[in-house]
Image (cartoon, helix red, strand yellow):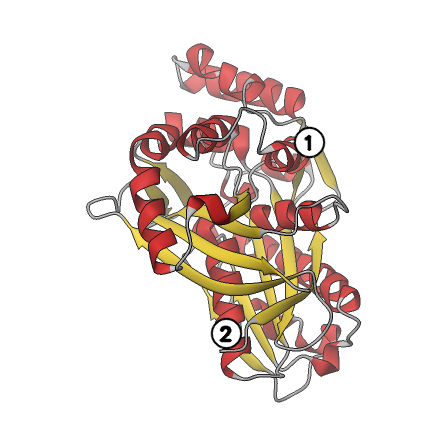
Amino acid sequence: MTFARLLGIGRAVPPNVMPQDEALEWARSHFSQIYPAFARMAPVFANSGIRERQLAMPMDWYFQPQDWVTRTIAYRKVAGALFVEAARDAIEASGLTPDMIDMVVTISSTGVATPSIEALVHDELGLRPDVVRVPVFGLGCAGGVSGLALAARLASTQPGSRVLFVAVELCTLSFRDDLANKANIVATALFGDGAAAAVLCTEGPAKVAVRTASEHLWPGTLDVMGWDVAPQGLGVIFAQSIPSLVTKQLRPALELLLDRMDTSMDQIGRFVCHPGGTKVITALEDSLELETGTLDAERLVLADHGNMSAPTVMFVLQRLLADADLPKRDMLMLALGPGFTLSGALLEPVD
């Protein structure tokens, strides 16, 4: 099989910036009145490793009562705008134009739109009428890796076709001021919004190609992470400690992935990980037997944008590929998401 090359990466974030200290003060003023244990939870804001995040909507929007209708209106508008910006960035970086795109893979789990987002922005972006659309819902934080892997497979099976991959997530639209529980407060401390895009093709100049990909779903873990659906909107589910699960169970699953990919730990020059939070990054370094601080790009992306779900790992990859000193060795992208699933994609350098 001819491997799909990563011709270019794009990204976009909304303009509404929320410093983490302001997020803490808002949470304190609100949750301390309805959640007696908030004082014990408050350190999660300071210890998150986040300096600031970008929000889909202006701050005053979040102070108003919201429901499915208002959240969906916001999702369609902002997700569409970020999709176009990230897609244009990636297409331009690839040296192409929108009318040269043959297929679009859209990843999003933080809102519902039918027609899907790539159809809503079809004319604005300038895609052809015959472009093939592949919208995917429900991958959550794993969507950045799983979506890129899917786009690469599609590009490889049709050599010469140009596949646009876009992950857009508006996690903050799920902020629920009516939910007084630990998971909701953690989500309020971690989530940000953004979009990332990439163009893949078996032909063209590139630094890396997607050689293979694999996933592992742990049995009996469906309740670890996901969405709870209520009239007010989506509510985050964190039924178990993700860092603890990573520490205990990641390495055996990773060994299975590496075996299926026909590679090994000593062949990996750089892991490219989804930074779900600072504790998750630390747990990843421990499980991967990396020196503390090795996942520096992950920490920087988390500090500047928070956890944007699926797009976040693509922000990390873009930062790493821009480094002129990046070792010419295989890279392994990793992300965890609902299922509970470990998703991996093996990238090899292109000569």
Q: Picture quarter containing residue 133?
A: bottom right
Looking at the image, which residue is at 35% across and 42% down?
A: 225
Q: Residue at x 55, y 77 (%)?
A: 155
- SS for callout 1: strand
- Above or below 106: residue 334: above
Q: Amino acid at mark 2?
A: Val
The reply, left or right, for residue 79 in relation to residue 255 is right
Query: Residue at the left extreme?
Result: 220
Name the mark nearer the viewer: 2 or 1.
2
Q: Residue at x 48, y 27 (%)?
A: 282
| Residue picked out by circle 2 | 134
Q: Which of 229/272 is in front?
A: 272
Question: Residue 123 versus residue 100: which sits nearer the camera?
Answer: 100
Image spot of residue 104 (x, y percent): 58, 74
- Binning the other alpha carbons within 10 Å of mark 1 as few (below 14), some (14 to 19) or many (20 upward) gives some
The residue sitting at 39% across, 59% down in the picture is: 262
Within the image, what quadrant is residue 84 found in? bottom right
Residue closer to the observer: 160 or 336: 160
Residue 272 position, x and y percent, is: 55, 45
Amino acid type, label 1: Met
Q: Position of residue 53 (x, y in %)?
A: 66, 35
Residue carrying label 1:
18
